[in-house]
Image (cartoon, helix red, strand yellow):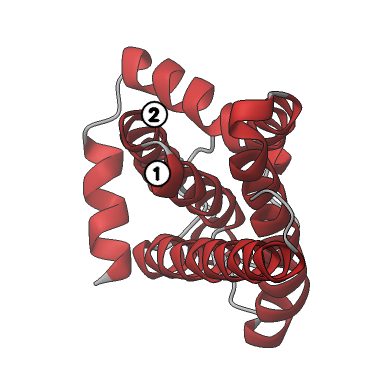
Amino acid sequence: MDFELLYRLQEIRSSMLDQLMLAVTFLGNGGWFWVAAGVTLAAVPSTRKMGFCVLLSLLMGLILGNGIVKNLVARDRPCWIDESVRLLIDVPKDYSFPSGHTLASFEAAVSILLYRRPLGIGALILACLIGFSRLYLFVHFPTDVLAGAVMGTAIALSVHWAAEALQTRRNVKKQETGERV
């Protein structure tokens, strides 16, 4: 079933879609776009906590998803199994599961959504497009992208919960000592 969807996507390829998907997937390369967004958000006092949550989520995903899960599962990529499909990008060297592009995108997008809904919705749309681009480019299976989205969401929610719990704890301590909250 995974290959069936990937082959159907190859049927809709066009030069315009090729260029669009190359541009979209580029935003997810190495998570650079999301790291830049996290650094930018962390630099502004009103979005500092959101920025730190984005960056911490990305770090956790790098360690858990790309460092541990990818190597434990060791799933071959579709382009390694069927080399007849012409790729528009270089053949990736790491394993397929989960999609690192999708993982990083959902970590950042969900982190943003939890603090600023309108901005987060735009980030989620971009995250979905980045995940879709990995299917279109024939470098991930649908289940890789789905796993990246689920894992990225779970990591972002965990980091958000921890950040909010830490903030609450700090506020309680300040109240106990009579400091201004």
Which of the 4 image quadrants contains residue 21? top left
Report the residue marked by disc 1. Answer: 113
Front-most of residues 55 and 100 = 55
As helix, strand or loop, the secondary structure at mark 1 comes to helix
Distance (Cα) linking label 1 and label 2: 7 Å
- From this view, report whether residue 169 is shown above or below residue 134: below
Where residue 127 appears, as percent x and y from the top left, is 42, 41
**Amino acid type at mark 1:** Leu
Q: Position of residue 29 (x, y in %)?
A: 67, 37
Asked whether, in this view, residue 123 is left or right of residue 30, the answer is left
Contact between marks 1 and 2 (CB within 8 A): the answer is yes
Q: Would residue 93 be visible to someone looking at this image?
A: yes
Name the side, left or right, on which 86 lies relative to 124: right
Can you identify the residue that label 2 sits on?
A: 119
Residues packed near mark 2 inside 10 Å, few (<14), some (14 to 19) or many (20 plus): few
Residue shown at 53% from the left, 67% from the top? 81
- Looking at the image, the residue that sits furthest to the top is 16
Residue at 71% x, 65% y is: 60
Residue at 55%, 46% (x, y): give it. 108
